Amino acid sequence: MDKRDKDIHHRIQNFSMAGAKWDLGPAFLIFYAEKYVAAAKAVQTAERTQNGKWHPVSMFLAGHSIELSLKAFLGLKGKTLSDSKKVSHNLKKLLAEARTSGLLKTSKLSKEERFEIERASVYYGEKVFEYPSVWEAVHAYPESPDGDQLISAAEHLVVDLMQLCIEHDSGPKPSNIKIIAGKAPEER
């Protein structure tokens, strides 16, 4: 990873103001994961009205939500985004690392959902959900995950991890600062 990539990950994960520092990586990642799973559900609804069985867009969005959620969880366990970059977009490896770090004590992911995350890993990591693959199309996408289970897994991760990620930061918690989402200080 070059220096610029590392700086970008550091800026995403860390925030400082007036000498106080916070690790906001998990909260930012889980908020994005929530948006991606909402988009996956909306797209899946639209895809169901279309002809054909292969609908990769909702699975890509669910996969991205899962990736962000797993990286948020690993952030709660002390891993940086730069550390997570080593497994890149490999959902199977991220899930394994998260499980080793205690994910199943926190999340209600079912055995079937975990299986579908692992199954989606190849198509997600190799961008088959994003770009057409003639070989996969000719063979009817033999390794395609179950889209319903994948979206369910993404939802479970977001719901199960949201509060932990919001409450997490590594910096001071000044009692005199109130944060009201979406409002500028003069609107409060």
Image: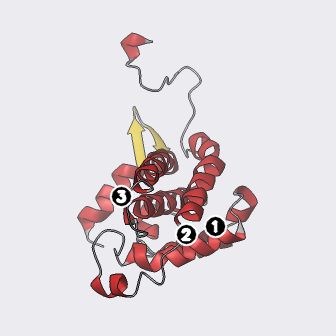
Residue under circle 1?
Answer: 113
Residue under circle 3?
Answer: 9
Say which quadrant the N terminus sits in. Answer: bottom left
Which mark is first along the chain, 2 or 1?
1
Residue under circle 2?
Answer: 146
Is residue 80 among the parts visible in the rendering? yes
Q: Nearer the viewer, mark 1 or mark 2?
A: 2
Above or below for 55 versus 15? below
Task: Between residue 170 and residue 28, name the one nearer to us.
Answer: 28
Q: Label 3's element?
A: helix
Above or below for 26 versus 163? below
Three-letter amino acid code at the position of disc 1: Glu
Quarter holding residue 123:
bottom left
Say which quadrant the C terminus sits in. Answer: top left
Q: Residue at x 36, y 84 (%)?
A: 136
Q: Label 2's element?
A: loop
Distance between mark 1 and mark 3 Cα atoms: 29 Å
The picture places residue 157, in percent across and down from the top left corner, at 60, 55
Q: Label 1's element?
A: helix
